[in-house]
Amino acid sequence: MRLTLRIWRQKDRNDPGGLQTYQLDDANEHMSFLEMLDVLNQHLIEKGDEPVAFEHDCREGICGACSLVINGVAHGPLSKTTVCQLHMRFFHEGQTITIEPWRAKGFPVLRDLIVDRSSFDRIMQAGGFIDVRTGAAPDANAIPIAKPTSDLAMDAAECIGCGACVAACPNGSAMLFVAAKASHLNLLPQGLPEKARRARAMVKQMEAEGFGSCTNFAECEAQCPKGISINFIAKLNRDFMKASLFPQGGGGKREA
Amino acid sequence: MKLDAKVPSGPLADKWTTYQDHLKLVSVKNKRKFSVIVVGTGLAGASAAASLSEMGYKVKAFCYQDSARRAHSIAAQGGINASKNYPNDGDSDFRLYYDTIKGGDFRSREANVYRLAQVSSNIIDQCVAQGVPFAREYGGLLANRSFGGALVSRTFYARGQTGQQLLLGAYSALMKEVGRGGVELHSRVDMQDLVVVDGKARGIVTRDMVTGEIKTWAADAVLLCTGGYVNVFYLSTNAKGCNATAAWRAHRRGAGFANPCYTQIHPTCIPQSGDYQSKLTLMSESLRNDGRIWVPKKQGETRAAVDIPENERDYYLERIYPAYGNLAPRDISSRAAKRMCDEGRGVGPTGRGVYLDFAEAINNFGEDVIRDRYGNLFEMYERITGEDPYKVPMRIYPAPHYSMGGLWVDYNLMSTIDGLFVLGEANFSDHGANRLGASALMQGLADGYFVIPYTLSAYLATVDQKAVSESDAEFKDTAQEVKSRIDGLLKVNGSRSVDSFHRELGNILIDKCGMSRSEEGLKEAIGKIGQLREQFHQDVRVLGEGTNLNQELEKAARVSDFFELGELMCYDALERRESCGAHLREEFQTEEGEAVRNDAEFAHAAVWEFTGDVSKPQLNKEPLTFETVKLATRSYK
């Protein structure tokens, strides 16, 4: 496979950066997209050029490290697929492929295709947990949870925290991520005592990190590699509204 | 090197509880005077850091990933074992312990394994309380399934992503503590060395992966929770960033390295497709619950799987191991697959593959049930191979997956360096020569949630050590050594990329120190690795600078340590003149290719000491004694 690659190169946070074009003649359809980039990088190293920096780790679609916008779409053309699981058989001979980093105010570029997503961690620190100490748990079967409820919580919990939702959103909103994380816990009986506090604290931190607001484009759902539903955004809005209207309702003092 | 396992006296089942009752404690108000460094934020590291912070210790946690949530525990698919006996099929702490010790081919430390089984149930309780959405039955209670090497259903799971869900649980506890101010978390920071003061671990040297800054950190104890080392093979199921540097650097500073040759080759991975391959993808072993493994009876079969009639298929695991069948332990299943392929009956374009067939299960239970159980795994398989496993059998082949070997630790999880504790896959203690499925998650969380909070407290309560700071000479000197090492790699400016060296090292190791080993092959490998290591230091090309984000430099530093570890694996495999678990020496096997153990000479952990010369490691032995079990030939027939 012969490909023309237009890749975002940026030395560091302060460099303005720009797209550079590379020709690659020895890709093949069985390679993953990242393996194709590996091959390009080996050629660059041979020529004495610095290889393209991109984030990746498990290459199994679960760690959420890989984060490329391919031809304008987060994680590329195949739905419900991370870049690391995307194979070159979904591209064609002679194709021009544009590869860019996630672009959002909440995700500053560190180098080339790598962005800083520590804002997600800070949102989690604000409320993405159940406050239980090690050793203080009752028997695991003490509280039965209806299978449909548990399955729905699991649907939300499938979020891998990659940030594609933010990259896909015209507003740079992180609502799908925050909604998935908050809903996973808010749906479970173990998460109920802190439901209101959690909704308020996570939304507040999201706004502080410079992410935009949700205006229901639903691009996030379309580009989410795990197919997280925007229904969870509706749920978070509801939880947040309820927490704001009834601050005493299971959430203690108003914090937002 | 003194190896005192410090196993408490008393009957096996009472050791841990009696020991806990008498351990020294640190008072509530004194806890905040102690600082602890935790390296790695996978299951072991995140659970340890969160638990220790909850107790009141000042914790500094480090990970090389951009977020603690991405540590490689996240990729575990199948499940986590616990002796809850919810299904009422006769499980107990003893049975879980016995299966684990037998699965490890009687090469693990009895007391540690029993403790692991004892705390396994607490782990499930803890995870459920954190909101881990384990699979449930319609009645609302937790579901279980069976897994390789066990005759009971004791595995808890969350779709095919149990690791992610457990790690998110531990990570959320960690985030809670970071938010509260108990843990200072440093991500994108890579540990480069250990600082030892007066024979005790007192700190680490790190490299900031964005700015390149080399920094030192002082503490009262250091916990390594840095995972395993099978990326030494280049192609493995590990994440690309998994590396042995933290453990190896600790080894060079005096920590004994135990059983490095025990590396697990997992039977169910997607076969390699080409030379560009960057990693191998695991398909959860849970698939073997419903999938049947077979190869054609005929050599050089060319028909498609679906065109091969039933009577021309060899369901070889069911044939050779009728009791366990497709659920035979990993080492046994992997070697059987290799033998089938060596006989010329492998399938797929490379001939290195066997079928994992779901036709019968789909026929029996319906496609919906199978989709509910394994939907995401089937999708993943189709994405990677372009084949639909609902219609044609999967092709699988073994791949390096887990390292049972690791830094030697005593019962308290402390290494041969005082104050250096090692948790999870990075230590050697619980899985012997082979790990059973769904036991890695169990061990990581057992160590972090339920063992280290006790044993570390006892250490801190009794240790007599002076205050240290980052401005002390030991810290400055170690940081200087790290700087020189990094500058050295940048200065070579040779002709070959880091990856090309790593691939070559991996090829030598998988060929000579992989699924089967021989004296001749290992000696050859040692020679080749030594030469390649020399070449690496003279001819590697690392472009760019050390003062910014430089992924080639990160890799180069790791590969340079893999060379030394790879050589040690070969010395260990050579020295162990028996076959046990995942370690098969061709000279010691039955005619059918089953392992022949030699308990009289090798019922010990081989603990290697760094002598200053990589090629002259010193061997020490911890004898393994068994009070409760009789050392039996491991049979799954």
Image (cartoon, coloured by chain):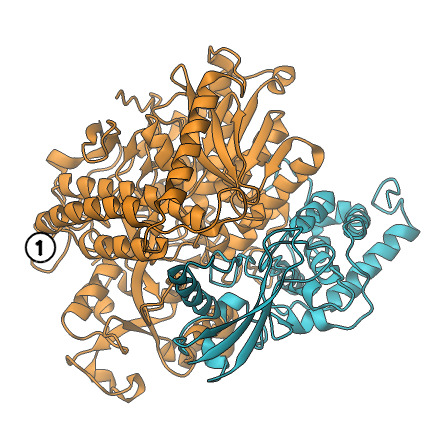
Chain colours: A cyan, B orange
Give B556 or B460, whichever is nearer the viewer. B556
x then y, percent, for residue B356: 33, 72
Vertical comparison of B272 with B612: above or below: below
**Residue A85 spot, x, y in % from top left:** 49, 69
- B404 up-or-down from B290: above or below: above
- Badge 1 crowding class, 10 Å Cα cut-off, few under 14, some 14 to 19, many 20 or more, is few
Residue at left 28%, top 41%? B565
In the displayed orientation, state which residue is furthest to the right: A245
The residue closer to the viewer here, A249 or B504, is B504
Q: Is residue B282 left or right of residue A239?
A: left
Q: Is B250 rendered above or below residue A18?
A: above
What's the amino acid at mark 1?
Answer: Thr
Q: Is residue A150 visible?
A: yes
Report x, y in % for residue B193. 42, 32
SS category of the residue bearing label 1: loop
At horizontal 65% and vertical 16% (from top left) the residue drawn is: B29
User: Does any portion of residue B106 appear in the rendered image?
Assistant: no
Q: How many numbered circles are shown? A: 1
Placement of the N terminus of chain B among the 4 image quadrants:
top left
Judging by the rendered image, the residue that carries numbered circle 1 is B590
- Place residue B393 in its image quadrant: bottom left
